[in-house]
Image (cartoon, rainbow, N blue to C red):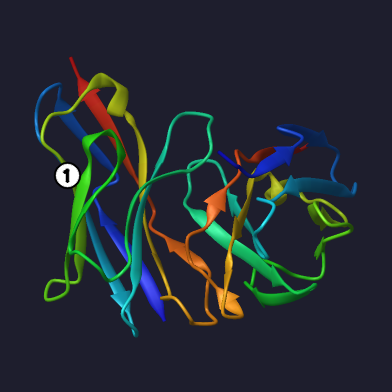
Amino acid sequence: AQSVTQLGSHVSVSEGALVLLRCNYSSSVPPYLFWYVQYPNQGLQLLLKYTSAATLVKGINGFEAEFKKSETSFHLTKPSAHMSDAAEYFCAVSAPLYSSASKIIFGSGTRLSIRP
Amino acid sequence: EPEVTQTPSHQVTQMGQEVILRCVPISNHLYFYWYRQILGQKVEFLVSFYNNEISEKSEIFDDQFSVERPDGSNFTLKIRSTKLEDSAMYFCASSREAGGVSYNEQFFGPGTRLTVL
């Protein structure tokens, strides 16, 4: 079974400050991990994904995430927040390639607010 | 860049009515999915579909729900008799086949907001 826990339903940072959104996962097999962003009244956009290659994954809009197996974590970071980063962020887990269990399990989401 | 499309963007219906939500997956994809997101909550898996049959479904996907690929391009979700609690955003997704099982990068459509009155 797989699950994802996002710590903090709401995170607020100042513009220019570090963004850190926390995600811990549970998986009985080596997982694929994802971060999705959802802007107000829009769909889901893939920010980045981990698929068992490099543990430090770079995504769009300056975001990156590091897969830490020992900590079962996949935290999302961005060195300097921009006003346009304000959105809902979802961490998600899925079974790896060549597994029949292909559904994506989403975390409950973290709403990121940016203070001017 | 190819993308998943969904119609309509917003559907309003009366409780007890049937609705059909439509999706056009990316053309070379063979795995299809529906997810839903109740307002303010997380995205939940409903069903996956491959080779004209359901691969997996969640507890949410009861007898009121059905999926169909009526032609070579569309993938539909039907709710037979809508309830108030079916109000949600419904996302379609698709992924490429790899060796007969799903390649796990799923591409999401923009969603259909269903409002049941």
Q: Residue at x 75, y 70 (%)?
A: B62
Amino acid type of the residue that numbered disc 1 sits on in the rendered structure? Thr
Quadrant of the rendering where the N terminus of chain A is positioned: bottom left
Q: Does any portion of residue B90 appear in the rendered image?
A: yes
Left or right: residue A114 versus residue A104 is left
Residue at the top extreme?
A116
Left or right: residue B111 versus residue B41 is right
Instruction: Determine whether B20 is above or below A24 in the image.
Output: above
B83 or B26: nearer the viewer: B26
Quadrant of the rendering where the C terminus of chain A is positioned: top left
Q: Quadrant of residue B34?
A: bottom right
Residue B30 image position (x, y, % from top left): 68, 65
B99 or A110: nearer the viewer: B99
Q: Chain of mark 1?
A: A
Q: Residue at x 71, y 40 (%)?
A: B6
Q: Residues within 10 Å of mark 1 (few under 14, many from 20)?
A: some
Instruction: Determine whether B53 is above or below A20 in the image.
Output: below
Pointer 1 residue = A77
Left or right: residue B104 versus residue B14 is left
